[in-house]
Image (spheres, helix red, strand yellow):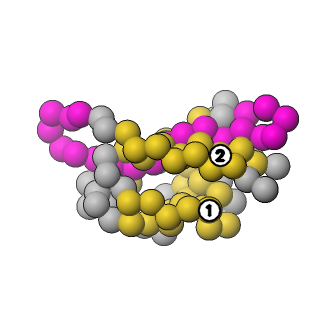
């Protein structure tokens, strides 16, 4: 069983608005993922590999307002509406 926390963040920018996802990936024992897990989306082929438990995936400005699927290691975990930056934290095996 995985625990997923999704929080909407609003980051102000002065020029071009970019949207994306960011968050933490930790294991049940409390250790942080460090390159072993893969975060991807249904939006494009970009991937993030959490380092020291943290990941950030910039999806550009065209995704803003769209609903996309987020995957952890290829498994669909959650659907989110992307508005600014969305924080998604995972606790996994």
Q: Does residue 3 sit above or below 70 in this rendering?
A: above
- In magenta, the rendered stretch is 12-34
Is any part of residue 58 visible from this angle? Answer: no
Q: Does residue 13 sit above or below 92 in this rendering?
A: above
Residue depicted at 51% across the width and 47% down the height: 6
Residue 90: which disc? 2
Residue depicted at 36% across the width and 56% down the height: 82
Q: Where residue 76 appears, x then y in whole percent?
A: 62, 67
Residue depicted at 59% across the width and 54% down the height: 39
In the structure shown, which secondary structural element does the residue marked by tag 2 occupy? strand
Characterize the local packing of mark 1: few (<14), some (14-19) or many (20 or more) Cα atoms within 10 angstroms: some
| Left or right: 46, with 74 as reference point | left
Q: Where residue 38 appears, x then y in whole percent?
A: 65, 53
Residue 77: which disc? 1
| Left or right: 71, with 20 as reference point | right
In the rendered image, the quadrant that contains the N terminus is bottom right
Q: Quadrant of residue 14?
A: top left
Residue depicted at 66% across the width and 34% down the height: 53
Residue 92: which disc? none
Q: Does residue 76 sit above or below 82 in this rendering?
A: below
| Left or right: 50, with 33 as reference point | left
Q: Where residue 58 appears, x then y in whole percent?
A: 40, 48
Which label's residue is closer to the chain start, 1 or 2? 1
Please report contact status of discs 1 and 2: CB closer than 8 Å, yes or no.
Answer: yes
In the structure shown, which secondary structural element does the residue marked by tag 1 occupy? strand
């Amino acid at each position: 069983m995985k625990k997923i926390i999704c929080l909407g963040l609003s980051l102000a920018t002065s020029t071009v608005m970019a949207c994306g996802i960011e968050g933490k990936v930790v294991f049940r024992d409390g250790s942080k993922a460090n390159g072993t897990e893969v975060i991807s989306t249904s939006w494009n082929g970009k991937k993030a590999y959490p380092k020291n438990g943290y990941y950030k995936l910039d999806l550009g400005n065209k995704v803003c307002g769209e609903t996309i699927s987020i995957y952890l290691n290829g498994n669909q975990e959650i659907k989110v509406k992307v508005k600014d930056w969305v924080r998604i934290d995972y606790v996994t095996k």
